[in-house]
Amino acid sequence: MITPQQIKQIPASLAAVLQGMRLYPGDHPQVRRQLLNVLDAMRPILLQKGRLHLGFADGTLLVEDLPCLEQQPAILELSQRIRDCKLKEILFFSGVDTAQLLELITQLLSSNEEIADTFAILGIEYIRVIPEEETPREVYRQALNVVESIYEDARLGRCPSAKMAFSAAQKMVSSAISRPYTLLAMTLLKDYDNYTFTHSVNVSVIAITVGRACNLNTEQLNLLGMGGMLHDLGKMSIDHAIITKPGQLSAAERCKMMEHPQRGVEIVSKMNDIPAEVIDIIHHHHLRYDHTGYPESSRNGKLSPLVDMVTIADTFDAMTTIRCYQKPFSPKKALDQLQHMSGSHLHPEYVKNFTRFLGPYPVGTLVRLHNDEIALVIDRNHQGDNSLKLKRIIGAMGQHIEDAPELSLPDSSQILAEVDPFLKGIQIEKYL
C-alpha cells in the first residue's frame, strides 16, 4: 500500500532537482542522482496505476489528490514555477525517464509558457503537461502562429512539424468543446494581410464545429482540426503572385492553382506521423460531394467523411470573407447558401447538422429586435438550448449605445429579422 509519506516525497524530490540545477548543469552527477531519486519516488505509483497526477486545487499543489501543505521554500518554488508556466496539471506515465524529467525541470526553470508545444516538438511521450484553460482568442492566436511557422517551413523547403499542428488542433478541439460558439466567432475576425494563414486556422475551427455538429469523437475532431490547418499547405510551392492575385485567375493560373492539393500531399508525405485521414483531406478538399472538382484522378475513389466536412468549412469561410469581386456573406446568409449547394457540391446531411448546430441566427449575425433595437449575436446555448447572448449596438431611436451592453434571450422569438451590417456602417469585428 502506498503511504502518504511516499506520495509527499515526490514533490520534494522534484524540488530538489530544481534546486540542484541552479548550481550544476544537467549532466552533473549530483543532478543525475537527484533525477534517479525522483524516479524511485514515483515508481510505486507508476507500477500500480500506470500514471501519476500532479496539479492544483484552489491554489494548493496536489499529488494524487493529496495536498502538499508544507511551506518549505523549495516546494513553494516548485509550485510557483509550475504556475509561471501556466500549467494546470502534469501527468507522468510509466516509461518516464531521467532525460524527460530533466527537460521538464529545464522548462520550469525557464518559465516557458509554451511548454506544451515544446514537449510536442521534442517528442516527450511520458510526461503530459496540461495548460490552464486558455481563452478562445488565445487558442486561436496560438494556432495562427503555428500555421504561420509550418507554412513558412514549407515555403523554404524545410520539413514542417506534424506535432506542432496536432498540438494546436488538440487545443482548438478542447476550446470548441467547452466554448464552441466563442471560438467560432474568432473566424469572423479576418486578417486580410495574412489571408492564407487565417483562412487555414478558420477552416480548422469551422471544420471542428461541423464535426461536433455531426457528433464525432475527440480523436476524429483532432484529425479534422489538423487537416483544416494543413489543407492549403501546397500553396506554399505555388508562385506567390498567383496566390495573392487580387482578381480572377487566367486559365493557366487556375491550372497552376489546381496543383496545390497534390503539392500539399508531397510536402506532408515527408513529415512524421501524418495520419492517412489528414492526407486525404489535403488531397481532396476541392473534390465536391458529387465528385466534380479536382483532382480528376480521384473522382471515382472513396473518401473519408472528414473530407466533406473540411469542404463545407472551406466554403463557409470563403463566403464570409471579403473579395474584390464580392462582399462577404453574413454567417446566416452563408448558411443559406450552403443549403443551396447541399447535395451537389456539399454533403447534405453534414450541412443540415451544421445549420442546426449554429441555429437560425448564428454567432456574428446582426439582428433587429422586437423593440427596434439592433444587436449582435455573440454566443448561444449558454443558458440552455436555443438561448442567445447579444450585444446591444443601436437603440430604438437609432442612437449608438456606448460599451455595447450584453443581453440574454431565452430564444430567438424576440428577433424580427437579420440586419445588413454594411447598410448600417457597423463593423461587427469590433464587438466580437
Image (cartoon, rainbow, N blue to C red):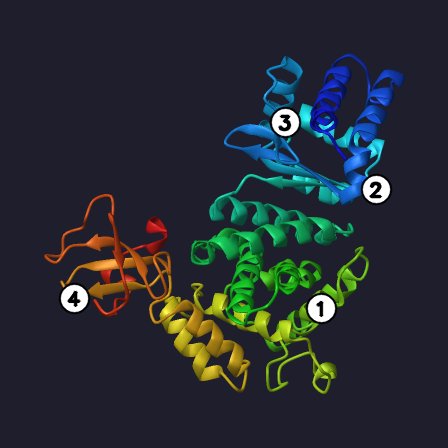
Q: Earlier in the sequence, mark 4 or mark 1?
A: 1
Q: Earlier in the sequence, mark 1 or mark 2?
A: 2
Q: Earlier in the sequence, mark 4 or mark 3?
A: 3
Cα–Cα span, label 4 and label 1: 47 Å
Q: Name the front one of labels 1 and 2.
A: 2
State whether residue 88 is above or below residue 381. above
Q: Residue at x 56, y 68 (%)?
A: 211
Q: Secondary structure at mark 4?
A: loop
The amino acid type of the residue labelled 1 equals: Glu
Q: Secondary structure at mark 1?
A: helix
Q: Residue at x 14, y 52 (%)?
A: 399
Residue 277 numbered mark, or none: 1
Residue at image mark 4: 370
| Place of residue 381 in the rendered image (x, y in percent of width and height, measured from the top left) | 37, 61
State whether residue 140 is above or below residue 214. above
Residue at image mark 2: 95
Residue at image mark 3: 111
Cα–Cα span, label 1 and label 2: 29 Å
Instruction: Look at the numbered discs 1 and 2 and tell me whether their residues touch, using CB distance below 8 Å.
Output: no
Tell me if mark 2 has few (under 14), some (14-19) or many (20+) residues whose alpha carbon lies within 10 angstroms of its own: few
